Amino acid sequence: GIGGLEQITSVFRYMKSILDTDDDAKLRRQVMANSKSLKLEALCLVRIMLSCKKHRPADIKQALLPILLPEICQCVNEDWYKVIAEALRVIMEIPSLLVAGSATKEEMDNVANSLYTAIEPKLSEHDLDQEIKECALSASASLLAILHSSLSMDQTNRFFTLLLERLKNETTRIAAIKTLSIIAKAAQTNSDLDLSPIMNETLSQLSILLRQQSRAVRQGALECIDTMALCLGHESSVSMDDGLFDSVLKDLSDIVVDTDLHLCHVALSASNSILKARPSTGSLVKCHILPAILTLSKSPLLQDAALASLLRLLEQIVLSDAVSFDELRGLLAGLISEGGNKAGKQVISNIAECIATIAVVTPPSERESFIENTISAITGSLGNTKQLNLLVAGDLGRKVNLSAIPGVANSLQMIFLQCLDSDNEDTKHAAALALGRASVASMGTFLPGILSSLESSKGKKQYLLLSSLREFIHCCRETGGIALSSNIPLILPHLEKNCRNEEEGVRTMVAECLGSLACIEPKTILPVLEKLAKDDAEDKRLVHWTVGNAIKFAIGGHISSNDLSPFMPTFLLLLQEDDLAVKNVALLMVYSAVHHSPQLVAGLMKDQIIPQIYDLAQLNLERKVDLGPFKHTVDDALPLRKAALSVFATCLEKCPSSLDISSFMPVMAKALADVEDIQLQAHQVIISMCSRHPIPVVAAADSFVEPLDKTVNKKKGTKTGTELERVYEWIKSGLRVMIA
């Protein structure tokens, strides 16, 4: 920063001499090459000082108010639009500074009136530059949101009137929407900021904007409706126009579609906010929003934020008695019956989560009856309906302790385990997921059952039980993983045992489990993985393969770099293994580390990683396979070369200082003459290097000429269709390198 109060005061006095408009100051400004640019730079400096966190707010406030505030407010009357806009940006920073600087009530009142006098004329004028209009709106948002208690009722209402005018103006509507959103967010935590004078007209206008073609306008309007709906208060606090909510919810329902999931998510959130603030709108939600929700629930695209918003809205619908639990459950379950066997796994999973979510918020007696009916439905149904009921029971078990209901947990565990032996593959996978999810809230009942069954099973069932365990660990991670910590000693021996399993699918499941556990309890799991990485038994290649994958999953799961760093030198020794599969996994582990946490490997690049990358990027292990009538050439090192180039390309982006780029140029020259996949990869790397590291590329350009010449003059032969298109893409890729 600039320093303490004395230094800040000195700077502000100098800024005052530049910004001051009195006669004496004019002479000084002429001496200082009186320019508009100088005044603009002065305002920029003041704004940066106000927003900078390296000064004490009290010092900035103490120096600003007596010395510079009048000049800043006067600058909004300048001729040059850039100076006016910058002055408004400075004004925007002042309210938050007063709060941070613990200003007195008198200081806040005086400053608020000064700022209002400066902002209001610019907010009301129409014939102004667009930048000034937007800055005036931002400044008014800051003033109203923070210093509203220091403004009179007339001043506040004047601002509200002007904001509505700007909202109706095509050129300023987006900025006005952002301003209203900021004010509404402040009103949620400040009861003295009353938006009732403009609530009806604002919501009506925002509803109209939802019909616009512009996505930015619709998104802003949706977010503003969502924020303002939470300011509605109880039914008698704000009188709403007849038909307003009907119009708003009808417009919202048109956006609840899977063609734009982000807008869909915000529309669902806005509907939820309206229903939460005004439960009396339940019948309108049922009429307009519910049909759109049911259609959306059948979409295989529904996921992430849109799904989460849908679940919250369904929960609120039941809590508000807009639709009864039984009716809503029947409508959701009926979607599977309508789809017949066409409903995919994602759709069944989403609908199951919807049903489980609304079941959680029903009264306990009604919920227990529903669980009993679900258990009966699992045993008496087939196909998609059986999968749905399995997943409903599992999702319900994530949120409700099923072991607290006599007999339910044991019955469900038996059913889940029996379904793992079903002839239907989809039913098996649904049962495995349900078993893992149900274990979350009833850990003491379900987890021992999973582990004991895992001990005695093999083959496909072992894989399914491990997928249950993976799902259980994943769900526990979402809730923080605290409850899982005490059970890790029970889980770990089973995972260690299956590190040596011959089935790659089983080992992958084990690696995912170990990776997730490492994110939850790194101090327990990482020493175990380090020990396994040093395993020297006959089947060590299987164990090392699993360890490499586990670390890769842990890094992808954002394990703490501080926890993992001490163990990385040991894990990087996997690059030196003889087994090609282990080498490949180790390369993918390094790729994940460089991509997610470059600091993990930056210090180890020179000694442990780069030499191996150079060697593996040139490794060639071709062999002839006799297929009877003809022979086929197989290159076992091809995946290693691909992975090595991927690591190099990521290092160029994330940690270029750790590379000796010049020494890698011969490797790139060989890659340009390699098989098609490697060539295309090398082309992308070189194009990237041309803009970031041109000097090594220029130095090695001669070695690139021959392979690139062969590529761009590739003979097409008798190829047609897709094969011909691939050749053309290959040639175009080579030409792009030459152009770069």
Image: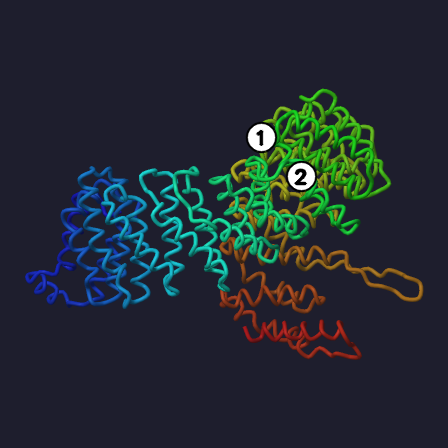
Type of amino acid under label 1 = Lys
Q: CA distance from mark 2 to mark 1?
A: 49 Å
Question: Residue reaching furthest front?
Answer: 242
Residue 602 horizontal/vertical position (percent): 52, 48
Residue 253 horizontal/vertical position (percent): 56, 53
Type of amino acid under label 2 = Glu
As helix, strand or loop, the secondary structure at mark 2 comes to helix
Q: Residue at x 70, y 50 (%)?
A: 584
Q: Residue at x 56, y 51 (%)?
A: 595
Please tell me how crowded label 1 is: few (under 14), some (14-19), or many (20+) other residues with Cα within 10 Å.
few
Please identify the quarter of the rendering in which residue 428 is found: top right
Question: Residue reaching furthest left?
Answer: 24
Apparent side of residue 25 relative to residue 425 in the rendered image (left or right): left
Apparent side of residue 338 relative to residue 424 in the rendered image (left or right): left
Which of disc 1 and disc 2 is earlier in sequence?
Answer: 2
Q: Residue at x 54, y 38 (%)?
A: 560
555 or 416: nearer the viewer: 416
As helix, strand or loop, the secondary structure at mark 1 comes to helix
Please identify the quarter of the rendering in which residue 28 is found: bottom left
Check disc 1 and report the residue beneath it: 523
For discs 2 and 1, the disc positioned in front in the rendered view = 2
221 or 400: nearer the viewer: 221
Apparent side of residue 8 relative to residue 717 in the rendered image (left or right): left
Check disc 2 and report the residue beneath it: 327
Residue 176 horizontal/vertical position (percent): 37, 57
Please tell me how crowded label 2 is: few (under 14), some (14-19), or many (20+) other residues with Cα within 10 Å.
few
Residue 490 visible in the displayed image: yes
